[in-house]
């Protein structure tokens, strides 16, 4: 079995290069992907499945931001769970304001695949810089 922390690092490295392939490769077909509650892209519950993550998370980031990046501070493995401390940095397309928000990610693995993801971030800052009100 591959090292879960290494798989997560590869997903972030790929994302930084504009390649979501390494992320898609580790997602379970029925992954439950949870954005922070009341964030601008939160649908009121988890995104279910890889396609939903691509359309509901990755797509809107490209649509709403220029230069979106995730600066990983550290990755902490804990058995089948990987914790990540990071910062989101980008420029909101609609307002030109800079996003510089602290984030934490929790990746839960089973048999080498991510079955659950949870994001925590400063939702106020996302709303403030984009001008997008949460829908939920």
Image (cartoon, helix red, strand yellow):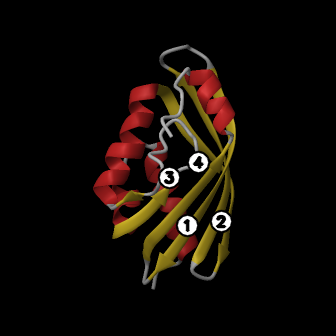
The span from disc 1 to disc 2 (Cα, nearest Å) is 6 Å
Residue found at x 34% / y 69%: 30
Residue bearing the label numbered 1: 107
Q: Pointer 1 and pointer 2: residues touching (CB < 8 Å)? A: yes
Dot placed on the residue nearer the N-terminal end, 3 or 2: 3
Dot placed on the residue nearer the N-terminal end, 2 or 4: 4
Note whether 26 is above or below 110 in the view shown: above
For label 4, the SS is loop
Foreground: disc 2 or disc 4: 4
Residue found at x 42% / y 44%: 57
The one nearer the camera, 3 or 84, is: 84
Q: Is residue 4 visible?
A: yes
The one nearer the camera, 106 or 11, is: 106
Foreground: disc 3 or disc 4: 4
Residue bearing the label numbered 3: 13
Crowding near pointer 1: few (<14 within 10 Å), some, many (20+)? many
């Amino acid at each position: 079995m591959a090292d879960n922390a290494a798989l997560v690092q590869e997903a972030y490295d790929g994302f930084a290069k504009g390649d979501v392939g390494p992320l898609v490769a580790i997602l379970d077909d029925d992954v439950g992907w949870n954005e922070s509650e009341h964030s601008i892209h939160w649908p009121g519950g988890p995104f279910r499945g890889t396609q939903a993550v691509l359309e509901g998370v990755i797509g809107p980031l490209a649509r709403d931001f220029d230069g979106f990046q995730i600066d990983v501070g550290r990755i902490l493995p804990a058995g089948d769970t990987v914790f990540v401390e990071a910062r989101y940095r980008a420029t909101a397309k609609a307002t030109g304001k800079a996003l510089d928000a602290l984030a934490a990610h929790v990746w839960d693995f089973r048999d080498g695949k991510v079955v659950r993801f949870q994001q925590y971030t400063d939702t106020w800052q996302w709303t403030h810089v984009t001008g997008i009100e949460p829908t939920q």
